[in-house]
Image: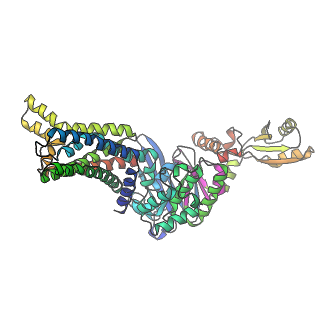
Amino acid sequence: MRAVWAVFKREVSLYFRSPIAYAIAFALLVFLGFLFNGFVTQSNGQFPADATAIPGLITFLLFLIAPLLTMRLLAEETREGTLELLMTLPMSEGAFIIGKFLAAWFYYTVLLLLTVVYYFILQWIGVPDQGTAFGAYLGAWLYGGAVLALTMIWSAVTEDQVVAAFLGAATVLVLYIAENAAQAIASLQLTSDAMANFVRELGLQAHFGATLAQGIIRAEDILYFLFLIVAALFITTRIVETRRWRA
Amino acid sequence: MVGAFDWTERERFMIEVEHLTKRYGEFTALKGISFTANPGQVTGFLGPNGAGKTTTMRILTGFTPPSSGRAVVAGYDVFNQSMDVRKRVGYLPENVPLYRDMTARGFLHYMGEIRGVKNLRQKVDDVLARVALLDRAESRIRTLSKGMRQRVGLAQALLHDPEVLILDEPTIGLDPLQVLELRALVRELGRDHTLLFSTHILSEVEQVCDRVIIIDQGRIVASGSPFELRAELERGGRVLVRADAPADAVAALLGTVPGVALAEAANDGVVVTPVSAEVDPRPELARAVVQQGWRLIELRPVAVNLEEIFLELTRQEQADMSIADVAMVDVAETETTEL
């Protein structure tokens, strides 16, 4: 626990001092600002203000954001050799990896909270639904945690940050388009719907777009994201362990 | 040979290694090595690159598990009680991995936080003072010289008052002055720690260690005090003779001395190769020079460098050749500082 906190603190301070983290935050906020502006002007006050658009967009953009935030976490430690030093301290791989993951999730949480400003702007020009907004933000938060944990796996696999980022982005995209793949499978009508449903349920969108993003908070969706986080952290831990055994 | 580990003997051997083996797929890096190390002793691990020094150290620090065999450090098994071992060991890995963007103080503070060191601020100041880095404590590690980084790494290894210190090639890449400083520090630390350090520089071992373990291709090929080892390795070795006469004349004369196989003029004197390892030609050489009426300036064994020793030790293993049968290359002690 002590080690988790120490690693967490260092990583968080690194995020807030790292140019790339600021570049990501800047790009994301500018981009969302433009889209939000267009969205508000187009709706022209005709429709009920929709506060779920922004968290929805963020979940889509996570395929870019998450790998950039996590690519460094373990790849750098392996390349610099500091992993060897850290793994001779009285600290388990698990504590080390959880500390790193929580720091990434924390930074993402701060980014997400910055966008809550759009909710308040909407409140000023219309009447956004509080419940759906809460569901969408909760969903985007869990979605982000899951995707960060998944992309972190690649940072443990390779010591090349660029490779880690590309593989991370690919992984997230595959899970993102599972929904489309499911539709394709269903349209082929080769098998029963079970296959299509299975693929669909594996994907990220099935647990966000139609449920949390609409303010429908289901235990199975929350469990899906939490399961992804735990599974990904477990895999990462085993990879680092294996690296150590082979060293 | 080391007996079975006995808990009542916990204090007797701080490090106890038995039949340690490490395999990487087909390749066997360690082929069953056994040794012990005691408190208050500096044990030098001597060997060429790839001999298994780093692997052994990584096993002892709990970084990587052995394939078979057993290692007990400070009374705890490195595999089953890894966390207990890690609490009691300070480790300086080869190439000193550090976070280059952190300050020296920040880095030590981070290490101490993970270790849960009590009175951390005070401890960080103490170790910084011990390695003479207090004035650079707020500098980023990337701006520090190689020698200073080495000392930051050493400070990190000392932070938690470990019983055992393991330093992997701590003097590599340092300038001669830094090497001297670091050796002095290692000697000093050796008094109140069990200190294991590796090097491939023979003279370093002689200056710093109480005991030497020579390791090659995953095997211990020799061990003992530096003095014993050196004497053994130099027996039957070549001798350098300098007299105040033309080198060619000296060489011609010495070539006729009994027990001499070859005498040839070199830059700084005459290098004499005895006929076999059993013969020490030095007394006869001295007599010959003096009888000729020349003055003898120097008579000493040609400095044996580590690569040659290894060549010999390993050839001995393979072909059972004696040390004297192997031609040695004249490399003087400039080797020692790795300029």
Residue A198 in the image: state x and y as whole percent. Answer: 13, 40
Residue B316 in the image: state x and y as whole percent. Answer: 61, 42
* Residue A202 vs residue B99, the one in the foreground: B99
Seen in the image, is B153 located left or right of residue B70? right
At 29% from the left edge and 49% from the top edge, which residue is drawn? A111
Q: Residue furthest right?
A: B293
| Rendered-image quadrant of the N terminus of chain A | bottom left
Position of residue B148 relative to residue B158, above or below, is above
Position of residue B190 relative to residue B142, above or below, is below
* Residue A44 vs residue A222, the one in the foreground: A44
Seen in the image, is B260 located left or right of residue B174? right
At 79% from the left edge and 46% from the top edge, which residue is drawn? B281
* Residue A121 vs residue B78, the one in the foreground: A121
* Residue A96 vs residue B300, the one in the foreground: A96
Residue B183 on the magenta span: no
Q: Residue furthest bottom?
A: B8
At 41% from the left edge and 50% from the top edge, which residue is drawn? A17
Count up the numbered dots.
0
Seen in the image, is B219 located left or right of residue A216? right
Residue B206 in the image: state x and y as whole percent. Answer: 66, 54
Residue B338 in the image: state x and y as whole percent. Answer: 64, 45
Seen in the image, is A120 located left or right of residue B210? left
Whether residue B229 is visible, yes or no, is no
Residue B207 on the magenta span: yes
Q: Which of the colour schemes (rainbow, by chain, secondary structure, one colour) is used? A: rainbow
Whether residue B154 is visible, yes or no, is yes
Q: Report the magenta residues as a range.
A: B195-223
